[in-house]
Amino acid sequence: MIYTKPDYYDEFTCIADKCKDTCCSGWQIVIDDEYLNKYKKNEKFSLFDMNEYVDFKEHVFKQSNDRRCAFLRDDNLCKLCFEYGESALCRTCHLYPRHIEEFENVREISLSLSCPQVCKILLNRDTKVKFVSCENDESEEYEDFDFMLYSCLLDARDVMIEILQNRGLSIDVRAGMVLGLAFDMEKRLNDGRFFTIEELLDYAITTDALVKSSAKINSFLSDKTRVYKYMKRKFETLIKLEPISYDWINLYSEADYILYKKGMENYTDISEKFDEYNKKDKRFDVILEQILVYFVFTYFCGAVYDSNIYGKAKLCVYSVYYIKELLKAMFVRNDYELTQEEIEDIVIRYSRELEHSDINLGKIEEF
């Protein structure tokens, strides 16, 4: 079995009640079958009447009116964990913010950006993220697992990350190249030209590819009317997501009003001021790069299960643009200033809305 993780993985330590937020509120915590049965039998947790804390029909922990887990104390510590230790926690609580993608003989482990401590680690990092792997003697076999497609997706992901970490290109060009590469890959797969994808990947990092892609993407970005209509249409899809946090609708509605309700000229003016503000120290492009690499590492290879290569790439790239649009709105609201903490807050809130809901992950791909 191969285990792969980002090189900042071991920097993370949960700071529990010292965290500015809590992962035990704002979303429905699903309980795995093993622990649901343990809680139902209630042999080891006799201090609690589990029927007061667990919705056995829905397989989730019950919540208070303000959507806090029934086990969460006022000091943001868990009653269950406090009394019985970590072994009393279900799989979700035990693992979070660790996220595991499973493939045949492979486990890819990431840290969710919805955790404030993880977000702080990644978004304050200047160096390019690398990934480290280790291997043991365990093995497994998945029925109907397409190992050839998986190997192809791994190679493509390596190329995408190489492109995304090319800081000689603008972040818009890098993101556009990832979308274009995924689109061409899926087209070749659907056209029965799977074995030509290798040459596509080789070409994608050549000087010729970089020059042509840059020209095409910059041509699009120079058309202000087209950009405004495109981003307005894309941003509208966010209102269709299942609200996870209580203030998501307010966050979306405020951003929509600030950015789009006054027309193209207002939107263009905001975008230009925002970009000019972030050119001062290049900090913002590095932040967007780290977020893009995070999403590509976490979700792209999942296309092995549905062949939705382009959809996975769009999930990754559009997520970064959704975050950027939300930050533009906050930038205006804050009199054209933006702190690191405010950037982290928006990333956390978007990540919770998207990554804490399989429904929303599916919707973004579908849109």
Image (cartoon, rainbow, N blue to C red):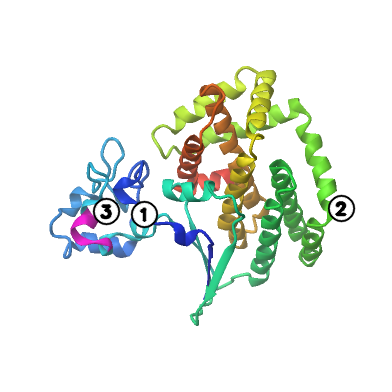
- State the residue lying farthest toward the front: 281
Q: Is residue 142 visible?
A: no
Of callouts 1 and 2, the N-terminal one: 1
10 Å crowding of disc 2: few (<14), some (14-19), many (20+): few
What secondary structure is found at the residue carrying circle 3?
A: loop
Q: Which residue is drawn at 61% across and 41% down?
A: 283
In magenta, the rendered stretch is 80-86
Disc 2 residue type (three-letter):
Asp
Of tags 2 and 3, the one toward the viewer is 2
* CA distance for labels 1 and 2: 46 Å
| Residue at the image point whose x is 67% and y is 22% from the top | 269
Q: Main secondary structure of the magenta part?
A: helix
Residue that badge 3 annotates: 56
| Dot 3 crowding, Cα within 10 Å, few <14, some 14–19, many 20+ | some
Q: Is residue 158 left or right of residue 192?
A: left
The mark closer to the camera, 1 or 2, is 1
The number of numbered badges drawn on the structure is 3
Q: In this figure, which residue is indicated by the disc labeled 2?
A: 208
Mark 1 highlights which residue? 14
**SS category of the residue bearing label 1:** loop
Q: Nearer the viewer, residue 263 or 133?
A: 133
Q: Determine the image quadrant of residue 323.
A: top right
Drawn side of residue 217 relative to residue 307, left or right: right
* Farthest-out residue, top: 262
- What kind of residue is marked 1? Cys
Horizontal and vertical percent for residue 132? 56, 67
